[in-house]
Amino acid sequence: MSRRGLACAVAALALSTVPVAVLSPSAVSQEVSPEQQQEGAPQAEDPEDLPGLIERMADVAQRVSAKGEEVKGLEDELAELEKEIGELELKAEEAQRTSEDASAAVAEQQERIDALAQKRYRRNAAATSVSAALNANDVASAVERMGYLGALSKAAKREEDAMVAASAAADDAHQEAVDAAEEARHKRDELQVKRDSVLKEKAELEEQQKELEATVDGLSPEAREAWVQHFGGSSDLDLAALADGSGSAAVEAALSRIGAPYGWGATGPDVFDCSGLMVWSYQQMGKSIPRTSQAQLAGGTPVPLDQLQPGDIVGYYPGVTHVGMYIGDGQIVHASTYGVPVAVVPLNSMPVEGAVRY
């Protein structure tokens, strides 16, 4: 059986509905319920079978870590949704102001048309251009009167056209404001459903984490050592030389955290989960990367495994439920699971799903 670093990332959403049973060392000799068997829970066996116990605990820990990545992803979705709602509400407010401005413009256009109508009335606007010409004293006056009345008519027509355009703009702006406000309300309803889901998932996760922590903390010294060794660790490497020769500030930062404890959802500087170690290490070189393991592998430029360079992020397990950082010499640095410090392990110590470069 190859060594497996515990995935700190999420498997699929389906995992969120699977209860996670955590075994304590004292419970391995007890019978399991039909429900546990149905859910694929670890089967009881002789307490002397330490490797079997560690293997079953590792499976549980992987699912708990996966749940943690799922919750982080949901929290990120909530944050994006909150931002989108804020933008929609601003859009609705701006559209409402535009609608009010357009309505005011319509009123102004109407006042201009009324003024022109009054002016035409005072200038015998009720008369036609022909009658105005006939009432003139001479040819020059007739031409002047016809031109003046014609100009008034054209000005009124322009004002009328402008009023129609302003009225249409007001109607469009009002409808835009209504639509934006309705979309914002819809998003808020969606947000509430999502928030309720996150709170439920988070409560389940915290309970599972507590159970696993209690199990690990209750291990005997021998079992605790076996737990750490299960996830490997390259003790015969010159890490200082790897860091100096990597040419990557992210690698140097990650290797400086060797021995740091694991923490669910932690992003440093003293405690980490797998994706959190990647985030913190890249922050030290002034670069921001996504927070979850799946997003990290989706956000970078894909790199073939035979072209890996120090600093590349490697994803593990189906669904990219774990990540580590390639440091050169066929090794990665990663944070695996509770009770196991940040360590260096072989690149192929876990099933690789892909790699990316930032």
Image: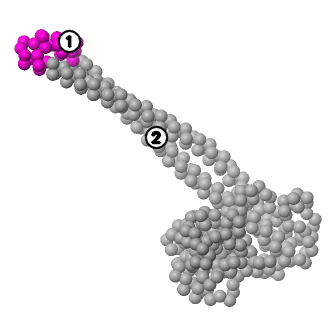
In this rendering, the label closer to the viewer, 1 or 2? 1
Is the magenta region chiefly helix, strand or loop?
helix
Q: Is residue 279 magenta?
A: no
> Which amino acid does the dot numbered 1 rest on?
Ala
Q: Do tag 1 and tag 2 residues touch (Cβ < 8 Å)?
A: no
Against 201, residue 255 (above or below) is: below
What residue is disc 2 on?
A: 93
Q: Residue at point 13% right, 14% down?
A: 133
In the rendered image, residue 143 lying in the magenta stretch gets the answer yes
Picture mark count: 2
Place of residue 182 in the rendered image (x, y in percent of width and height, measured from the top left): 55, 38
Which numbered disc covers residue 127?
Answer: 1
User: Does residue 3 appear in this view?
Assistant: yes
Residue located 82% across and 81% down the image: 222
Query: SS for tag 2?
Result: helix
Q: Where on the picture, by quarter, is residue 51? A: bottom right
Mark 1 or mark 2: whose residue is earlier in sequence? 2
In this rendering, the answer to whether 306 lies above or below 38 is below
Residue 33: which quarter of the image?
bottom right
Left or right: 112 as drawn, with respect to 133: right
Where's residue 295, x and y in %?
60, 63
Q: CA distance from mark 1 to mark 2?
A: 48 Å
Magenta part of the protein: which range?
A: 120-145
State the residue at coordinates (62%, 84%): 329
Judge left or right: residue 129 versus residue 64.
left
Could you tell me the amino acid type at mark 2?
A: Glu
Q: Position of residue 18 (x, y in %)?
A: 79, 57
Q: Is residue 86 left or right of residue 44?
A: left
Kind of element beneath mark 1: loop
Category of crowding for the residue at label 1, using alpha-carbon neighbours closer than 10 angstroms: few (below 14), some (14–19), many (at least 20): few
